[in-house]
Amino acid sequence: MDHRGYYGPFGGAFIPEILVSTFEELVAAFETAKADPSFWKEYEQVMSTYSCRPTPITFAENLTRHFGGAKIYIKREDLNHTGAHKANNVMGQGLLVKRMGKSRVIAETGAGQHGVATATMAAKYGLECTIYMGETDVERQRPNVFWMERLGARVVAVKDGSRILKDAINEAFRDWVSHMDHTHYVLGTACGPHPYPEMVSYFQSIIGKEARKQILEQTGELPSRVYACVGGGSNALGIFSGFLDDAVELVGVEAAGKGLQTGKHAARLASSDGSPGVAQGYKTYFLQNEDGQMKETHSVAAGLDYIGVSPILASLGEKGRVRFEGATDREVIDALTLTLKMEGLIPALESAHAFAQAFKEASKLSTDDIILINQSGRGDKDIFTIADAFDDPGWKTFIQKKAEEYRA
Ligand SMILES: *Cc1c(COP(=O)(O)O)cnc(C)c1O
C-alpha cells in the first residue's frame, strides 16, 4: 500500500471535502494505535475474554475420509461472540473510538450481522449507536432488528433507492457528514475509502496469525491451500494475511449464485462481469454496466451479496497471489448438508462457499496435502433460508401453524 491507501491501481479515498479532516483524524488515530504494542495486546485481551479467542482449528476427520484426498482443517470463526468474524473488526474499532474520545457510532448493515455486532460493542463500551439498514432488509431480517433494538441501538430503515445495503451505506455517510465531531462510522468490511480496507484487515489479521501458529502446532506443516469466502473480503484477508509470505495457495470464493453465466451472482473477480470503477469512496472491481450503473447481485448468502470487493483483494487477484472461484447456491447447499451430517458443524451460508470450493478440489490433492477452510460464521441465522432450500415439510407445517395462530 502507498501512503494514500492505494493497492496497485485500487483503493484510494474518494470522499467529500467536508470529511477530509475526519478521515485524517482517523488515519492518525489508527497509525498511532498500530505503532503502539500495548494496543494490540489490549485488543487480544478483549478478544480472549469477550469473544472466545483464540478460536480453534478443527480436523475434519470424516470429511477427509469421505473425499480421500487432502487432510481438511477448519478455522472456527463461528465461535466468536455474535457468531462470526465480524466481532474482530467491531471490537477493534471500538477500542479506537475510545482512544479518539468519541461518544457515538454509526454503521450500515445488510443482513443485520454487522449491525448486531456493532450494537453489542456499543453496549459494552457505553456508546450511542445508530444502525442504517435498507427498508427491504429490515423486513427480511426481523430477528436481527429485534436484537439491535434490545441492545440499545436505534435502527433506521432507509427508504431510498432499492432500499438495500448500498442505500444504507449512502445514508450512513450522510449522517457522518453532519455529526463527525463526536461520531465514528464503523464500516463492516475491508472496503470503502482508506483507511478502512487497511484498518479492517488489520483487526481481522488476528485470524491468520492464530491459524498459522495452530496448524504448525497441530500438524508440523503449513497447508497447501487456504480457502475463504469473499463478500467484502474481510474474513478472507484475515486468514490469508497469515500465509501471504509462504508457499501457500490462497483461494477466495465468491457467490456464483444461480451460475456465473446467468448474470444472477455476486462474483466481481471470479466472473468476467466485474470491471474497475469508483463508487462508495474507493476504486475496485464492481458489478456495473458500461455506464457505471450498479447491477443487481444475487446470492443465497446475504453476506456475500455486494457489488464491490476489497481493493486489497482486487490487487492480490491482479498479481496472481489469490485465485478467485465461484460456488453456486446449489453447490453451497450441498456442501452445507455434507458438513452438517459428517462433522456436526453448522457453517453460515457465506462460509459454506469456501467449503464447497474446497470439496471440489480436496480429492484431487494427495493425502500428504493439508487444506485449511475459514468457517467465517455459524449458520443458525440462516434457518429460514436453509429450511426453504431443503423444502422441509415439517418446517412448512410449523410456519403455517404459527401464521394461523398469529391471525387468530
Ligand atoms: C458478513 C459475513 C461474510 C462476508 O464478509 P467478508 O467481509 O467478506 O468477510 C462472510 N461470512 C459471514 C459469516 C458473515 O457474517
Image: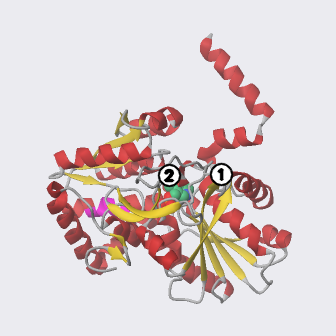
Q: Position of residue 91 (x, y in %)?
A: 37, 60
Q: How many marks?
A: 2
How busy is the neighbourhood of tag 1: few (under 14 within 10 Å), some, or many (20 plus)?
A: few
Secondary element under disc 1, as helix, strand or loop, is loop
Which quadrant does the N terminus fall into? bottom left
Within 8 Å of ligand 1, the CB of disc 1? Answer: no
Residue at 53% in and 35% down? 140
In front of the other: 252 or 64: 252
29 relative to 371 in the view: left or right: left
Question: Would you say residue 46 sits in the magenta stretch?
Answer: no
Residue at 65% in and 83% down? 223
Question: What is the CA distance from the residue labelled 1 to the residue labelled 2?
Answer: 34 Å
Majority secondary structure in the magenta region? helix
Q: Tell me, yes or no, if residue 404 can be seen here.
A: yes
Q: Which residues are magenta?
A: 91-96
Q: Which residue is mark 2?
A: 82
Q: Position of residue 31 (x, y in %)?
A: 25, 75
Q: Which residue is mark 1?
A: 262
In front of the other: 342 or 9: 9
Residue flagged by tag 1: what amino acid is it? Thr
Q: Earlier in the sequence, mark 1 or mark 2?
A: 2
Secondary element under disc 2, as helix, strand or loop, is helix
Q: How is the image coloured?
A: secondary structure
Q: Position of residue 375 (x, y in %)?
A: 61, 63
Q: Position of residue 54 (x, y in %)?
A: 52, 70
Picture quarter containing residue 272?
Answer: bottom right
Residue flagged by tag 2: what amino acid is it? Thr
Is the residue under label 2 in contact with that under label 1 (CB below 8 Å)? no
Answer above or below: position of 83 versus 191: above
234 relative to 396 in the view: left or right: left
Answer above or below: position of 64 versus 295: below
Picture quarter containing residue 46?
Answer: bottom left
